[in-house]
Image (cartoon, grey):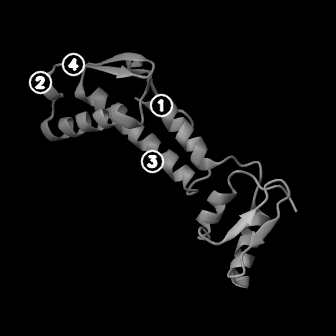
Amino acid sequence: MAEIGPNFKNELAAAGLVGLPIAWDAASGAVTYADSVTQEERDAVAAVLAAHDPETPDRGKAAAAAIAAGCAIASAGTPALNATYHASGAAWQMMRDEALYIAAFGEFSGGLAELDWTAVSGDVLFETTAQFMAVARAIGDWLTHWHRFAAGRTEISPGGTAEIA
């Protein structure tokens, strides 16, 4: 038997096998089944184990770490927007709220002509609502890709940077 890596539980989930009364030893690769686990379920777990690569990291932990670190925005057209932005918590909620306001009213909240923003890596000045919306959209898309990666719906890790014009 081969070693069982940290992503095995996610692979079981993707196969619809979460909740089975089983246990495994990561070092030896041995799987123990409760008496209530059917042969069909055991075969399904064995198939997941046979396809398992113990070197694959835990996708959920990788996604959580990336999201906690923030999304780096790289703008070719407006380098002043290049920064690492919050992609979770209250700061991300504020960005989503501002984007909703802009979508509804076509301007920055409070009637501001420009919007100062505190990013993870420092302060950013949005001179237009289009700039703000491009950053907010890029972060939202980046988050969607990380959530899909964590759920096993794509093999491609989004990385830490999103590019905008």
Q: Residue 142 in the image: x percent, y percent?
A: 46, 41
64 relative to 54 in the view: left or right: left
Residue position for label 1: 70
Q: Alpha carbon of mark 4 to alpha carbon of mark 3: how far?
A: 28 Å
The answer for how far apart the CA atoms under marks 1 and 3 are is 13 Å
Residue at position x 76%, y 62% in the image: 24
Q: If you read the primary sequence from the N terminus, does the residue marked by circle 1 or circle 2 appear first? A: 1
**N-term mark: 1 or 3:** 1
Report the mark closest to the observer, 1 or 4.
1
Task: Give the number of the disc on residue 144.
Answer: 3
Q: Earlier in the sequence, mark 1 or mark 4?
A: 1
| Residues at marks 1 and 2, CA–CA distance in whole angstroms | 28 Å
Q: Do the residues labelled 2 and 4 touch (CB within 8 Å)?
A: no
Numbered badge on residue 114: 4
- For label 4, count other residues whose C-alpha is less than 10 Å away and answer few (under 14), some (14-19) or many (20+): some
Residue under label 2, please give it.
111
